[in-house]
Image (cartoon, grey):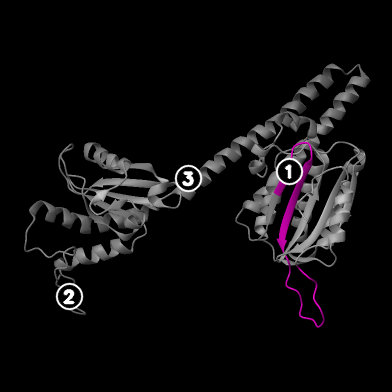
């Protein structure tokens, strides 16, 4: 929380909970009370604010504040909880339901002001586990260890802590991934120097250095792309993009790698599909799906690319007959740096970022990407992007329900001898 907000909150607590704490200790029956509905005198319009009005104004301000505020008496009973605290579900009547928060109050009484993070149980909040930052303060002066009222100020920091954890993991993963090709280049350069009199060995090491340099360049490029997709930069203005052009560009980028492995790229498209998006990003996403399929498909096989309109989305499906993805790994294949088979990473030159980029492109366009796979049969990755609104025109419109039956049969034929598309038409 911003320091100025803590200062303002301290002033409010000084006015509100301080007065309440004094009343708790004196218990004067004649004192006006907000809790029991007793009338509290208020100032006339234009008149100076009287001392008796300050607790009312302070309490109103507490009720309007986003941070949750809870005041505990010497017996840990709740004597004040603003609406934000009750909305968190941490208070029931005069009980504080989270033992960890009560423990914070005890620590405050022993050693003074304290800040800590406390995990709220999922069943208590009702929206999954949440982390709150707690600032506990004594609201009455006095010797340490002397019982007294304690105020707890709570701020939801779940998202902030999640972002911090993601950032730490990202930095650690980037450091690890960069260290591999850089270390390989250093070793190869040293080996090349030692084999200066052996031209054949030098050529072999030089080829390997080129491979590692390409891998490093691809990693840096994909890191830049991913940081742009995840960053705060606004998405470029969405424009109508022909799906045919996106697929054609992706196939062209991947054709050389496919030919090198004897893999045939078969394309079956529904005509005239137009989406709203950024053509360069969509082409990159489809290219990554195709490159992934080529990398993990055996030689002399087929990869099918199919497009269709369905439920207001254009679907671009990339189907291979490769090694497939184990069931336990399917939910994680779109994570950054995650690889199903770590032992193949060096051989394939993969960075573990390609599918993460696909996911963020889909999300930024209001779409999604899904995977269907069976080990030994292959995989189908489906990118869904919202269709552009069709211009008003006379005559019958194209049925958006799906691809025609003959196109489904053609797509199945393109990956003959596999059951990859079974049940997915």
Mark 1, residues whose alpha carbon is within 10 Å: few (<14), some, or many (≥20)? Answer: many
The residues bearing labels 3 and 2 have C-alpha atoms spaced at a distance of: 45 Å
Question: In the rendered structure, which disc, 3 or 1, sits on the residue that comes first in sequence?
Answer: 3
Q: How many marks?
A: 3
Residue 373 tag number? 1
The residues bearing labels 3 and 1 have C-alpha atoms spaced at a distance of: 34 Å
In the image, residue 359 lies at what x, y percent? 68, 51
> Left or right: 24 with respect to 99?
left
Is 382 above or below relative to 374?
A: below
**Which one is in front in this view, the residue at disc 3 or the one at disc 1?**
1
Q: Which residue is tagged 2? A: 43
Residue 161 tag number? 3
> Left or right: 287 with respect to 266?
left
> Is residue 376 inside the magenta stretch?
yes
Farthest residue to the front: give it: 423
> Is residue 292 inside the magenta stretch?
no
Question: In the rendered structure, which disc, 2 or 1, sits on the residue that comes first in sequence?
Answer: 2
Is 246 above or below relative to 135?
A: below
Q: Secondary structure at mark 3?
A: helix
Is 302 above or below relative to 243?
A: above
Magenta range = 371-400
Residue 418 tag number? none
Mark 2, residues whose alpha carbon is within 10 Å: few (<14), some, or many (≥20)? Answer: few
Q: Secondary structure at mark 2?
A: loop
The residues bearing labels 2 and 1 have C-alpha atoms spaced at a distance of: 72 Å
Q: Are marks 3 and 2 in contact (CB under 8 Å)?
A: no
Query: If the image is split into quadrants, where does the C terminus sit?
Result: bottom right
Q: Secondary structure at mark 1?
A: strand
Q: Are marks 3 and 1 in contact (CB under 8 Å)?
A: no
In the image, residue 75 lies at what x, y percent? 17, 44
Asked if residue 179 can be seen in this view, the reply is yes
């Amino acid at each position: 929380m911003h320091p100025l907000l803590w200062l303002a909150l301290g002033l409010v607590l000084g006015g509100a909970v301080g007065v309440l704490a004094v009343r708790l200790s004196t218990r004067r029956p004649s004192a006006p009370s907000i809790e029991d509905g007793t009338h509290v005198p208020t100032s006339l319009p234009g008149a100076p604010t009287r001392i008796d009005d300050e607790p009312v104004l302070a309490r109103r301000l507490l009720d309007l504040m986003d941070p949750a505020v809870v005041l505990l008496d010497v017996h840990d009973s709740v004597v004040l909880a603003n609406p934000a605290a009750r909305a968190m579900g941490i208070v029931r009547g005069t009980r504080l339901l989270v033992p960890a928060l009560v423990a914070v109050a005890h620590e405050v009484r022993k050693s003074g002001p304290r800040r800590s993070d406390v995990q709220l149980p999922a069943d208590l909040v009702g929206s999954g586990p949440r982390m709150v930052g707690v600032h506990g303060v004594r609201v009455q002066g006095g010797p340490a260890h002397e019982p007294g009222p304690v105020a707890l100020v709570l701020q939801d920091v779940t998202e902030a802590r999640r972002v911090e954890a993601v950032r730490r993991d990202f930095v650690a993963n980037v450091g690890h991934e960069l260290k591999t090709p850089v270390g390989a280049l250093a070793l190869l350069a040293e080996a090349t120097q030692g084999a200066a009199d052996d031209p054949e060995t030098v050529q072999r090491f030089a080829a390997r250095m080129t491979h590692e340099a390409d891998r490093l360049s691809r990693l840096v490029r994909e890191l830049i792309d991913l940081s742009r997709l995840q960053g705060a930069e606004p998405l470029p203005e969405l424009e109508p993009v022909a799906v045919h052009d996106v697929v054609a560009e992706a196939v062209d980028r991947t054709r050389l790698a496919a030919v090198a492995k004897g893999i045939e790229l078969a394309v079956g498209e529904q005509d005239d599909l137009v989406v709203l998006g950024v053509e360069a990003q969509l082409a990159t996403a489809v290219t990554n799906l195709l490159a992934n399929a080529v990398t993990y498909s055996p030689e002399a096989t087929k990869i099918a690319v199919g497009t269709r309109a369905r439920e207001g989305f254009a679907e671009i499906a990339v189907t291979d007959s490769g090694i497939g993805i184990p069931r336990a790994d399917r939910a994680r294949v779109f994570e950054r740096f995650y690889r199903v088979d770590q032992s193949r990473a060096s051989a394939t030159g993969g960075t573990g970022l390609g599918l993460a980029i696909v996911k963020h492109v889909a999300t930024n366009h209001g779409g999604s990407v899904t995977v269907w796979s069976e080990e030994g049969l292959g995989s189908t990755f489906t990118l869904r992007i919202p269709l552009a609104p069709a211009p008003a025109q006379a005559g019958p419109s194209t049925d958006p329900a799906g691809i025609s039956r003959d196109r489904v049969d053609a797509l199945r034929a393109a990956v003959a001898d596999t059951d990859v598309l079974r049940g997915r038409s």
